[in-house]
Image (cartoon, grey):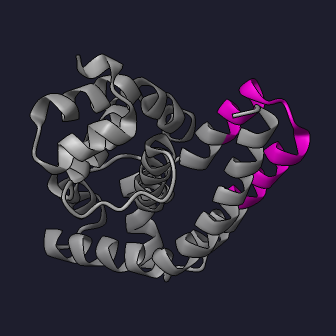
Amino acid sequence: MYQQLTDDALMQLLRNSDAAAFAEIYRRHWERLALQVLKITRSREDARDIVQEVFVSVWKRRMEIELRGPLVVYLLKSVRNVAIRYIERNITRHNYLQTLSGSIAAEAPDPILHCEYRELQHKLDRAVASLPPKMQEVYLLSRNERMSYKEIADHLGIAENTVRKQLSNALKSLRTSVSELTISLLVCMATMLQVAGL
């Protein structure tokens, strides 16, 4: 029965807390949403988590969601917004931009996009290089060498709490640069998706 209903009809039922209507919306759209997020995150696990986060939000906000167009457009916009937050959280992770750059080059071999990604990586590297020396050292040992707080503390002969504080301050310092990088990164991603016809 639910499979024959339109998205609008399902949303009406969902507003009345109809769990079967919610299940049908999920079944109907989850794969497309997951594929969309996968193009951004390059991680099936993260794509699954992001889609689930969006659907949990849809259920929680079911009585207040106001659609101004097709449901699928709303859902796609929602997963993109969550994916943006994912990028903001992970852009300082070691080789994150390089991984994305390699994926872009393989999927949409556009040298301009590839150069944009390399430039983003250079900007992030410069932001890291501008950190105070000790803070930079702690950050690089954490990100590049994947050392734990204790390992870094032992390696540098400092307290574990000092490592924790230095790394926290490094990430705070990089967040300003990250927010600027994210805007450029998203412009590149939008261009890539257009090139790919998505």
Quadrant position of residue 40 = top right
Which percent across, then down, holds residue 121? 67, 56
Q: Using the image as rendered, state which of residue 91 and residue 137 is in the foreground.
A: 91
Q: Position of residue 167 (x, y in %)?
A: 32, 71
Q: Nearer the viewer, residue 7 or 31?
A: 7
- The structure residue drawn at horizontal position 43% and vertical position 31%, both measured from the top left corner, is 34
Q: Residue at x 66, y 71 (%)?
A: 126
For the N terminus, the image quarter is top left
Q: Is residue 128 left or right of residue 195?
A: left
Outermost residue, right direction?
Answer: 111
Establish if 153 lies above or below 80. Answer: below
Q: Position of residue 163 (x, y in %)?
A: 25, 70
Image position of 52 with respect to 161: above or below: above
Residue at image location 24% in from the left, 68% down from the top:
157
In the visual, does 99 lie left or right of 105?
left
> Which corner quadrant of the image does residue 44 belong to?
top left
The quadrant in which the C terminus is found is top right
The picture places residue 75, in percent across and down from the top left corner, at: 42, 46
* Stretch in magenta: 101-121
Instruction: Give the quarter of the image for residue 33.
Output: top left
Q: Which is nearer the eye, 151 or 124?
A: 124
Q: Is residue 144 magenta?
A: no
